[in-house]
Amino acid sequence: MINPARFDLVLIVLGCLPLLRLNQATFFDTPGVYCGVQPIGPEELAEKEIDALPGEWPWHAAIYQIRREGAVYVCGGTMIDERFVVTAAQCVCDRASAATLNNETILVRMGVLNLGAPFQLMSQQYSVADVFIHPNFTVDDFRADIAVLKLTMVVRFSDYIHPVCVDQKGDLHVARGTIVGWGSTNVISDLSDVQLPLYSGVICGTAQEESTFCAGYANFTSVCYGDIGGGIFTKIAHAWHLLGILSMDKNKSVDNENCHIDGFATFTKVYNFLPWIEKVTKLELLETSDEHKFVIPTGVPAKKCALTDPQNSTSNSSHLPQDCGRYVINRILHGQRTELFEFPWMAIVRYLVAPIHELENLCTGSLISNRYVLTAAHCVRASKKPYQVRLGEHTIGQERDCHRNDDQECAPPVRDYDIECIAQHRGYNRRLQQDNIALIRLDQDVTFEDHIQPICLPTSSYLKTLQIPQYIVTGWGDTETGHKSMTLLKTTVKQANRSECQEWMTVRGLKLTEDQLCVGERDGADNCKGDGGAPLGYSAEYNRGMRFVQFGIVSFGSGCGVVPSVYTRVASYMDWITATISSLDSD
C-alpha cells in the first residue's frame, strides 16, 4: 500500500488457537475525552505531503513481538479505548505451535511515526495484559480475523494519542475509506495513508460476505504485509470511525517489492463483531451524538503577534526583571519531587481540544517577566494554538497545594491568564527542529506572589558563554516508569557528548547546531515525553548573587533516558528575545 519499501520480515499468518481465559476488564470513564478527534488543523493538512503528520492518526498502533533479537514490528492496530487495541487475529499467534502468543511477548507502541525511531518524544509503549482472539478464527480462510489486546495500564491521551470511534451502522454508507500503515515492516518505514474505494463482500466475492468487505481495485491494490491488523477509517459527523481491519493472505502478493496484491484487499467488518468486543472488554462502545454538551472555555485562540522584524529591533535586556530566579532549595536528587515554591516560574500552556471544547495541558514554559512566557515553537504552531497559560501550579488537579504533611503552609490558588498573542521564531523548521523557540505575551501583567516568580535568563556575556557540566530540568511529563506525573518533578541531567549526539541526529536526518544543547545520558536521567517547552537551568552568579538561570528549552528527543535530548540554547536567542519584547512593548 502505502510505502513501497522492500519487505524484509516474514509476517506470521498461521492459525492460532483461541484464547480461553477472560479476565474481568475495567472501563475507566474519562470525562471530556471523545473518540475520533484528529488534532490537526486544516493549515497543516493542506501543506501535507505523503507521510502522516504527528497526531494525524492518533489511534494507530504499532504491534511488536519480543524475540531473541529484540522487539520486532509485525502488525498495525487501532486503539478503541484507553485500555484496548484491536488488530487482526493472525498478528498474535505463534508460527510453530499455532497457539496464541503469550501476552508477555507482545508490545504496543502508540504515537509512532517512523518504525526506525519508535521512541519519539510523542510516543508511548505499553505491555499487554491479555490477548483475546475471536473463537471462530480459522487460518484456512481467515474467518473472524480479529483480536483484542488489553493493555496493562491505561493509555495517557495526548495531542498524538487518542482513541477512534467504532462504526455502528455496518452498511458501508460511505464510498471511500482511508487505510493507515507503514506499508512494510521495514525499520525505516514512515507512517502514511491512502484512500481506497469500498465494496461489499458480495461484490468482491469474499468467502465471508457478511462479516467482511473489500477496498481497492479488481486488478491490484497497493497494500503491504506490514499494514495487516491496521484499520480503515471514515469521517462521520466530524469524528473518525473504524470500519474494518485489514486481513490479508500473504500468498496473494504478486509483487513483494511494491507490496501489491492481485485484487481487492479484504477487511474484517468490525461492526459484525461489536457484541463480541463488548463481551471481552466489558465496554459499552460510545455512540457519537450531536447532543454532547460542550463547555466553552474563556479566552480566544492565540493569534500571531504583530511586530516589527526583531532582527532590526533594538536588543535591550532592561525589559527583563532584575529580581528573578530566586532558588531557595538546593537539594537536588534524581527524579525528586519538587518542594512548594521551589520553581515558581513554571508555566503550563493550555490548549482547546476540538471538537470537545475543553482545555488540556499539553506543553510547558517558563515565566520570564510579568508579561511573557518562554516556550518551544512546536508548542504554538498553526494547528496547536494555546488558549491560556496557567501559573503557580504544583500538583495538577489538587485544589490546594500545600507542603507535604503540613496543611498550615499552602500556596495561593493557581492563576490562569489569557493570551494576547504569540511570537514564534521566523526560522523555526519543524522537520529540521531548528530555531525551536517562541514567546507568549499574556493579555495582562502578572502579579508576582510566592508561587509565581520569573526565572533569570543569560543576559550577560559571562552567562552566555558559561560552561555547566550539569543542569536541572523540571516538568510534569511522563516519568521513567511510564506514568504521567501530576506533581512537578525535577531531575539533574549532564552534558552529553556532542559527537555521539550528532551521530544520533544524523540517523534521523538532523544536524546538531551551535544553537542547541545536547543533554542527558543513555539510561540516565532525562526529560520525558510531555515536557516540551520546559526550562533547563541551574544556579549561577547573576547580579552579584546566586540565582536560577534558564539555559535551555526542551525541544525534542526520545524521552526517558533512552538517548540524549536536544534543547534550544537560550543564550543564542537572547537578542531575539529582548528585541521581540521591546518591539511588542513599544506598540
Image: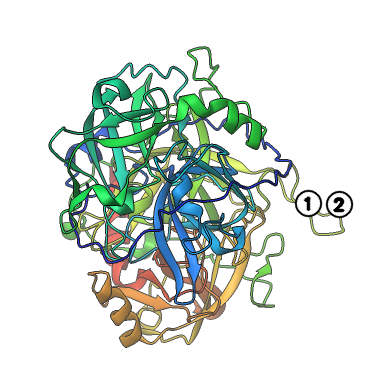
Residue 543, horizontal then vertical, whole percent: 49, 76
Residue 449 in the image, given as x and y percentages of width and height: 64, 52
Residue 67, percent across and down? 49, 71
Counting every numbered tag in the picture gives 2
Q: Is residue 420 above or below residue 20?
A: above
Q: Is residue 297 left or right of residue 401?
A: left
Q: Hey, which quadrant is residue 46 in on the image?
A: top left
Q: Is residue 119 visible?
A: no
The residue drawn where x is 54% and y is 80% is 524
Image point (40%, 85%), residue name? 466
Secondary structure found at label 1: loop
Q: Are marks 1 and 2 in contact (CB under 8 Å)?
A: yes
User: 351 or 268: nearer the eye?
Assistant: 268
* Residues packed near mark 2 inside 10 Å, few (<14), some (14 to 19) or many (20 plus): few
**Amino acid type of disc 2?**
Asp
Which residue is disc 1 drawn over? Answer: 410
Q: Does 476 sit above or below residue 324? A: above
Q: Nearer the viewer, residue 508 or 4?
A: 4
For the point 57% across and 50% down, which residue is it?
Answer: 17
Q: Secondary structure at mark 2?
A: loop
Which residue occupies 40% across, 67% down?
557
Scheme of colours in the image: rainbow
Find residue 514 and report its image quarter.
Answer: bottom left
Is 218 rendered above or below residue 129? above
Quarter the C terminus occupies? top left
Within-10-Å neighbours for mark 1: few <14, some 14–19, many 20+:
some
Q: Report the residue that reaches farthest toward the top.
A: 291
Question: What residue is pinned by disc 2?
Answer: 407
Q: Amino acid at mark 1?
A: Cys
Q: Nearer the viewer, residue 252 or 542?
A: 252
